[in-house]
Structure formats: structure tokens, C-alpha cells
Image (tube, rainbow, N blue to C red):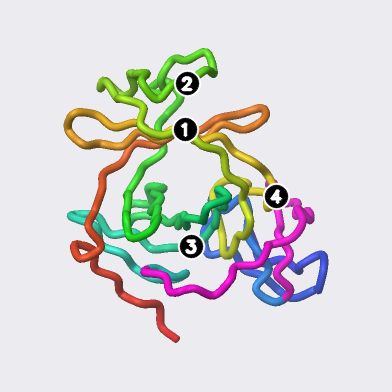
């Protein structure tokens, strides 16, 4: 998409990636949906309360053999606390997510629909899922609200929208995560990383 003017404040915005579908205006904070050559308002960005974070927008993060440049930051509240999700792309242009929750870090890739687990929408913590050729034990079921977004994403995240989350783990320690909302779902496969195993090259100030 070519540079465009924010429909709220009029400032010029130039998306860094052609695949971006949602972003926040850096000047006024309005959330914008980018649809082909059209731009429409999508609401507010929420309040990203300042807390120490391992990763920030524009950072280059290396996890094992993979390096991802961070373009988006979303925060989800589950009542007792919150966690942060960072979206970015690898050098080859692949979409990746880095989830950070109380020091735990998961590096995930989105699964194609043909690799999603088959389910009836009812999950139990003693249940199992089969996805991407592996079996997973369901460990956690919860719901959370998207409370803030910043930067750019390749999907639309709406502040105030509530999601159901399913987290399951394979015997090899891989994590399968599902996000389910009214009218849709997404599934992700990833690996755990110790924060001390991660290298973060901060964005230029």
C-alpha cells in the first residue's frame, strides 16, 4: 500500500510492509484497518501502560536459529494479569509471534487451516488435540480481552474484543495455542525459550 493520510488526524503514514492489515497511527493513536487501497477507522489503540518489557517495536529478536523483526505489540488481560504478544516477520518474510508472560517466552508460527486440530468447540484440561502431525495435552483454558495495540499487524486485532484461549503441549515440549472468537479462530505452533537464550537488538532511537 502506498503512503496515505490518517483519516482521523491527517498525518501521512507509510506502512513498512505491504502485508500489513492493521496499524495504529503513530501521531494520534487511532487504530486503522487497511483493506486493499481503502483505509477505515477501527477504533482506539487502548492504553499500553508503561511496564518493563523484554521486547519493543522495531527490535530485532533472535531465538535459536531464527531472527524476527518486531512490528506490532498487543496486550491481553485475563483478569489476574496480562501478557504481551509481539508480531513480526523473519528475513524471509514469514509471519511470527513472540508471546511473553511473566518471564515465559514462546516463539510461534501460525498454522495453516489444514493443520488445525479438529474439535467441537468444547475443550477440557484433561483432553487432547491432534494438530500438525502431533498429539497435544490441553494444559490451560482461559479467556482474555485485548486491551491495547501498537504498531502494525498482518491481521485485525480489536481493542475490547474477547478471545478464548487454548494452550496444549506435546510430549516433546512444543506448544499448540488456539485463539477462538465470535466467527473465527487461529492456531499457532511454537517452542518455549528461556529469556536468557534470547538476543534482542534494540531499535535505533
Q: Position of residue 154 (x, y in %)?
A: 54, 49
Against 166, residue 67 (above or below) is below
Q: Which disc, if any, is residue 123?
A: 2
CA separation in Å, label 3 and label 2: 32 Å
The residue located at (71%, 57%) in the rendering is 32
Residue 150 sits in quarter: bottom right
Q: Point out which mark residue 182 bears.
A: none
The label nearer to you, 1 versus 3, is: 1
What's the magenta region? 28-54
First in residue order: circle 4 vs circle 1: 1
Q: Quarter holding the C terminus?
A: bottom left
- The residue beneath circle 1 is 141
Q: Earlier in the sequence, mark 4 or mark 3?
A: 3
**Residue 143 located left or right of residue 7:** left
How far is disc 4 from disc 3 in space, using C-alphas? 21 Å
Q: CA distance from mark 4 to mark 1?
A: 19 Å
Residue pictured at 31% horizontal, 41% vertical: 190
Q: Residue at x 62, y 33 (%)?
A: 181
Q: Which of marks 3 and 1 precedes in the sequence? A: 3
> Dots 2 and 1: beta carbons under 8 Å?
yes
Asked if the residue at tag 1 contacts the one at tag 4, i.e. Cβ–Cβ closer than 8 Å, the answer is no
Looking at this view, is 147 or 125 the one in front?
A: 125
The answer to whether marks 4 and 2 mark residues whose Cβ atoms lie closer than 8 Å is no
Q: Can you tell which of label 4 and label 3 is closer to the viewer?
A: 4
Residue 204 in the image: state x and y as whole percent. Answer: 41, 83
Characterize the local packing of mark 1: few (<14), some (14-19) or many (20 or more) Cα atoms within 10 angstroms: some
Q: Secondary structure at mark 2?
A: loop
* Mark 2–mark 1 distance (CA, rounded to whole Å): 8 Å
Amino acid at each position: 500500500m502506498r503512503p496515505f493520510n490518517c483519516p482521523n488526524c491527517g498525518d501521512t503514514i507509510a506502512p513498512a510492509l505491504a502485508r500489513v492489515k492493521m496499524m495504529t497511527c503513530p501521531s494520534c493513536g487511532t487504530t486503522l484497518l487497511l483493506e486493499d487501497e481503502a483505509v477505515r477507522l477501527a477504533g482506539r489503540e487502548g492504553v499500553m501502560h508503561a511496564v518493563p518489557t523484554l521486547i519493543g517495536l522495531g527490535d530485532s529478536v533472535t531465538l535459536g536459529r531464527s531472527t524476527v523483526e518486531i512490528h506490532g505489540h498487543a496486550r491481553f488481560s485475563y483478569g489476574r494479569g496480562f501478557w504481551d504478544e509481539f508480531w513480526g516477520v523473519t528475513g524471509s518474510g514469514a509471519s511470527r509471534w513472540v508471546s511473553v508472560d511473566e518471564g515465559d517466552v514462546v516463539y510461534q508460527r501460525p498454522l495453516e487451516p489444514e493443520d488445525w486440530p479438529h474439535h467441537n468447540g468444547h475443550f477440557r484440561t484433561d483432553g487432547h488435540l491432534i494438530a500438525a502431525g502431533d498429539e497435544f495435552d490441553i494444559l490451560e483454558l482461559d479467556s482474555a480481552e485485548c486491551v491495547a495495540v501498537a504498531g502494525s499487524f498482518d491481521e485485525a486485532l480489536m481493542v475490547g474484543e474477547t478471545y478464548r484461549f487454548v494452550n496444549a503441549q506435546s510430549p516433546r515440549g512444543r506448544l499448540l495455542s488456539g485463539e477462538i472468537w465470535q466467527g473465527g479462530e487461529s492456531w499457532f505452533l511454537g517452542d518455549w525459550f528461556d529469556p536468557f537464550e534470547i538476543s534482542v537488538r534494540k531499535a535505533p532511537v
